[in-house]
Image (cartoon, grey):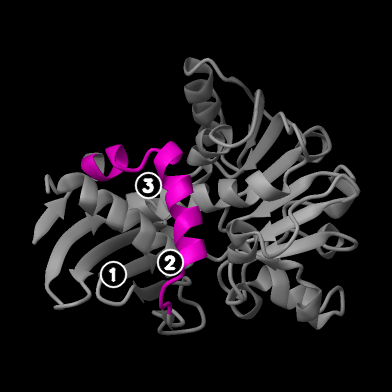
Amino acid sequence: MKIIDTESTRRALPFERLIPALREMFVAGCEVPLRHTHSLQAGADDPPRTVLVMPAWQRDRYLGIKTVTIFPDNAQRGLPGLFSTYVLYDASTGEPLAQIDGNEITSRRTAAASALAASYLAPAGARSLLVVGCGRVGSLVPEAYRAVLPIERVVVWDRDESAAKALAARLCAQNIEAAVAPDLAKAVNDVDVVSCATLATQPLVQGAWLRPRSHLDLIGSFTPQMREADDACFAGARLFVDTQEALHKSGELLGPMSRGVFAAADVAGELADLAAGRIQERAESDGRTVFKAVGTALEDLAAAVLVYEASDPH
């Protein structure tokens, strides 16, 4: 079994290759059971800690299993809030082929899926992007979006201003116009696309701040307790999800649905529908679009196959 390290995983997943690979996997499809989610909280006063187990496979091709640990209180220790490992197998024999850096797979496929959705849903010619949350995933969003949209200006915001300043500096060093947003409400109202990648449990973005024809991308809320956007963000918007699992996992959707803001039947489609051309992408007459992702093991498998095949000389 190969051990593929962080740097090798990163090199194998440039967004110019990864985004088309995700599109192809969404069209082809694979077996994706519901993820296993387990809380590691022993008591009500313990910090929230979660482990996810996410399998996916294509018959007689590849089988992959990702294990993810989510410890939001790690920020106080100077550590990332999320760690993951990925093991890829031969689906016809069960032979383990590779252990791959799951953090790189997760962060890069997450940003790539967000960009893939935006390629269908963002306003035509979208040139400005606000990134809310400058952690591992958020820091990759500008690069991913620039692979599919003519983004010229990036604004970044984070509760930790030093993280926002660091990301803006990295983007400027790549000759990308970038700045820290001093005021989140004003920044939201000043861009074509808003992408949120946080571990927030209370809404950060308000619908009243958004432009009427903007695209809102919500990455962070993958448990019922998490939210990044208020109810007004969804009112009158055309809503898409990465998979139906989002409707059962994300507080972003469960909360507004419980209050009658929208119903599950109001969801316009899934990312696979957009990729396969089964539903209409953004039309000129559309107002706001919203994309809510919780992540799917299909994306992990697509990325892991890219990494493994790049490492295999045959």
Q: Secondary structure at mark 1?
A: strand
Q: Secondary structure at mark 2?
A: helix
Q: Residue at x 71, y 63 (%)?
A: 240
Q: Amino acid at mark 3?
A: Gly
Mark 1–mark 3 Cα distance, whole angstroms, equals: 30 Å
Q: Amino acid at mark 2?
A: Leu
Q: Secondary structure at mark 3?
A: loop
What label does residue 64 carry, if any?
Answer: 1
Q: Is residue 61 magenta?
A: no
Height in image: 94 above or below 168? Answer: below
| Among numbered discs 3 and 2, the one appearing first in the sequence | 3
Height in image: 264 above or below 144? Answer: below
Q: Amino acid at mark 1?
A: Gly
Residue 275 position in % (x across, y down) = 59, 57
Q: Is residue 15 magenta?
A: yes
In-front residue for pair 51/53: 53
Pointer 2 with pointer 1, Cβ within 8 A: no
Q: Nearer the viewer, mark 1 or mark 3?
A: 1
Q: Which residues are magenta?
A: 8-32
| Among numbered discs 2 and 1, the one appearing first in the sequence | 1
Q: Answer whether residue 136 is visible to the viewer in this image.
A: no
Mark 2–mark 1 Cα distance, whole angstroms, equals: 9 Å
Residue carrying label 3: 78
Residue carrying label 2: 298
